[in-house]
Image (spheres, rainbow, N blue to C red):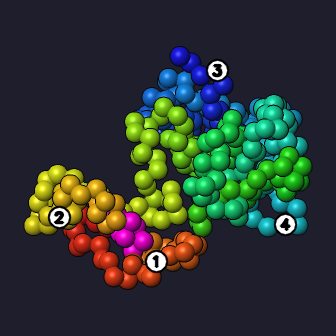
Amino acid sequence: MTNPSPWRATVLTLFPEMFPGPLGVSLAGRALASELWQIEARDIRASAIDRHRSVDDTPAGGGPGMVLRADVLAAAIDAAEVGPERPRLLMSPRGRPLTQARVMELAQGPGPLIVCGRFEGIDQRVIDGRGLEEVSIGDYVLSGGEIAALALIDACVRLLPGVMGKEASGTEESFSDGLLEYPQYTRPQLFEGVPIPEILTSGDHAKVAAWRRAQSEALTAARRPDLWAQIPAKTPIRAGRQKTPKNKTDG
């Protein structure tokens, strides 16, 4: 049965041919084909106002590069006719870091409008005038916002009902409870002389759960002290006593 109001991503870009891209395969692709979600890629250049279809101009005050024009981008946003209930996002390295908590909020809503910038950025008056929320996927600079938009959409789509095979898959992974995910193992039992940790094959679910929690705490404290500092009411650092088993397959 088709969802009458599927989650929808509307993307404004100079390169609409980049979508759905990798979102058209695997879990996201099957869900897209099943109409569990929708994507619309709109060409910003379609809102250009001159015969050359110009979308950018030199930055006011001088400097290198070009800036997306306010009038063109504003017209593209308006033409998308996105209602106030849908978030308006701008993928930008100066935005707030995207977190799993924010992804969950976006996945539970109707779906966002996502603006993909290019060149040196976009006119600040559009950000202010159209209420764009700047979002970053990391402290680095990409050629444009399209790859960042793909990452954000993928993170949301996998949380939509019916997309993932097991609902538990979405809750027992990195960041779902503020911690990094514990190490995973599967067959063969012995790989290059390293066995699967014995506790994982013990059949004792309580001990397995405790081991996994301790491993998550240890990894978070070691690799992401910024996240570890935000975990409330931590036990006396089990992370210091528990060590991840040496495994040649772990990076």
Residue 115 drawn above or below residue 231: above
Tag 4 residue: 62
Q: Quadrant of the C terminus?
A: bottom left
Tag 2 residue: 198
Q: CA distance from mark 4 to mark 2?
A: 64 Å
Q: Nearer the viewer, residue 178 or 65?
A: 178
Question: Does the magenta segment cover residue 69?
Answer: no
Contact flag, marks 1 and 3 (Cβ < 8 Å): no
In the picture, measured across the screen, residue 194 lies left or right of residue 128, that is left
Contact flag, marks 1 and 2 (Cβ < 8 Å): no
Nearer mark to the viewer, of 3 and 2: 2
Tag 1 residue: 235
Nearer mark to the viewer, of 4 and 3: 3
Q: Nearer the viewer, residue 2 or 70?
A: 2
Q: CA distance from mark 4 to mark 3?
A: 50 Å
Q: Nearer the viewer, residue 77 or 99?
A: 99
Contact flag, marks 1 and 4 (Cβ < 8 Å): no
Q: CA distance from mark 1 to mark 4?
A: 55 Å
Contact flag, marks 3 and 2 (Cβ < 8 Å): no
> Is residue 146 among the parts visible in the rendering?
no
In the picture, measured across the screen, residue 200 lies left or right of residue 167, that is left
Which residues lie in the magenta part?
212-218
Tag 3 residue: 4
Residue 225 drawn above or below residue 126: below
| Label 3 environment density (alpha carbons within 10 Å; few <14, some 14–19, many ≥20) | few
Could you tell which of marks 1 and 4 lies nearer the N-terminus? 4
Q: Secondary structure at mark 3?
A: loop
Please, which residue is most extreme toward the top here? 1
Q: Nearer the viewer, residue 176 or 132?
A: 176
